[in-house]
Image (cartoon, grey):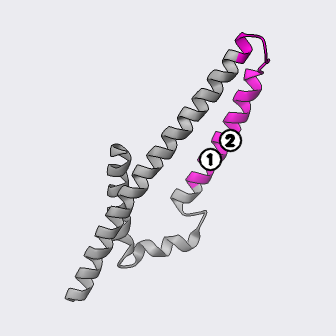
Amino acid sequence: MAIDDVSAIITTAGGGFLVGILVGWALKKVVKLFAIMAGLFLAGLTILQYQQIASVNWDKLEQALEGAINAVVNATTKMIDGSGHPEMTGLAVTAFGIPITSSMSIGFTIGFMKG
């Protein structure tokens, strides 16, 4: 293995780590914002129902949310096992696929925890 190959792998791993930190941090911020907005929306619906201004069918709302969550889980599962994008499976066996994937996942974990 030549020095150029080693430096390319180190650069790829370091860049993947930094990108992973940024993506993890940003994703956690988006998830927090979405959770706050959803919580305020549901609290508002509860208040409107309590004051008898609006009537909410909670069973129908639960079924709609369950369907949306199942769709997200199915899409995520397809992305993880590679069936959603078969062209991405070739990246893992290249010289850059393993270092960037491992360093990015470590960076993502750290960024998500610190975000």
Q: Quadrant of the N terminus?
A: bottom left
The residue that label 2 is drawn on is 68
Q: Quadrant of residue 48?
A: top right
Q: Which mark is residue 72?
A: 1
Residue 78 locus on image (x, y percent): 59, 57
Mark 1 residue element: helix
The answer to whether residue 70 shows anywhere in this view is yes
Mark 2 residue element: helix
In the depicted structure, whether residue 39 falls above or below residue 1: above
- Give the residue at x 38% y 65%: 101
- Give the residue at x 43% y 56%: 23
Q: Amino acid at mark 2?
A: Ala
How far is the residue under mark 2 from the one under mark 1? 6 Å
Q: Which mark is residue 106?
A: none
Q: Residues within 10 Å of mark 2 (few under 14, many from 20)?
A: few
Q: Amino acid at mark 1?
A: Val
- Give the residue at x 60% y 33%: 38
